[in-house]
Amino acid sequence: MKTEPVILVPAEDDSCVLDEAIVGAFGLPAGKPFVGIKGDPSLRETAPIRSKFASRIDQKVGPALERVEWLLAETGCYSIYIGFNSSEVRTESIFNPFNYEIHDVDALLSDDYISRHFVQAPFDEKMNTIAWVRTMVQTGPLRNYLPEHWQQLMDEQRANWQPMKKELIQDIIDGFHQLRAIDGYYLRNAAISLSEGIVRASFNCDGTYIVRADYFPEFVKQNLPG
């Protein structure tokens, strides 16, 4: 079947790559502590009348979230996704950064399982490794493929990057606990990325928010009922 060629039109202002994506290669748009995405309207309209059922992760939510916090703070994990409905936890590790793993929450509560699947690493060394890998990729042979404005923007991003503070992990996890406990519009799944410094939170009304990690505690306060 014959198709028409795709013609790429360059943007008038190359800096638009900083703010035209929801979350682009350079993170959240500057000056925005969070962005929201509206989902299926039918889910929003029926959310108040749909019953909330406790999942397996809800039945052990305290130990489960404590384990998630520990994985981010004390092991090579730099990104974690928590599916509260499915009770799955997806992790990404600096020891194999191009793969992600999927774990059942019950397995994560087993010390033997944890010792087999996760490697402990100092938090500061993990964050330094993220910066080192980013520098190696962006300044190595692949740099020749980057447009000039990408090179400049990436150089500026690396120079200004501040690693997420370890203490913030507990505040974010506490926020997940509070948002999941809401009866009406509650947390359905969530993710934390240490490398990007962002938190993703999706709710049963099918709305999703991507929030700057250091702003997330304030975001939680603003979205708790009463």
Image: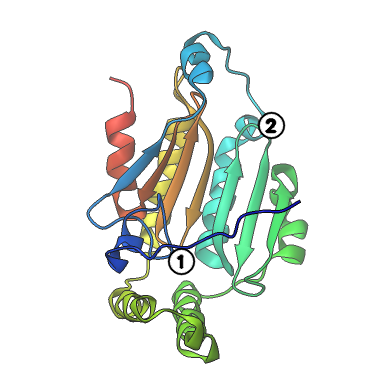
Which color scheme does this rendered protein use?
Answer: rainbow
Q: Quadrant of residue 167?
A: bottom left
Q: Classify residue 104 as left or right of residue 51.
A: right
Q: CA distance from mark 1 to mark 2?
A: 29 Å
- Mark 2: which amino acid? Arg
Mark 1: secondary structure: loop
* Image coordinates for residue 223, horizontal then vertical, percent: 32, 30
Q: Classify residue 214 as left or right of residue 65.
A: left
* Image coordinates for residue 213, horizontal then vertical, percent: 36, 53
Q: How many marks?
A: 2
* Image coordinates for residue 161, horizontal then vertical, percent: 33, 73
Query: Which of the marked residues, 1 or 2, is nearer the chain's N terminus?
Result: 2
* Image coordinates for residue 72, horizontal then vertical, percent: 53, 60
Above-or-below relation of 211 to 197: above
Residue on which the image places disc 1: 195
Q: Quadrant of residue 208?
A: top left
Give me the residue at 28% from left, 19% from top. Answer: 226
Toward the bottom, the furthest residue is 141
Say which of marks 1 and 2 sits in front: 1
| Labels 1 & 2 near each other (Cβ < 8 A) | no
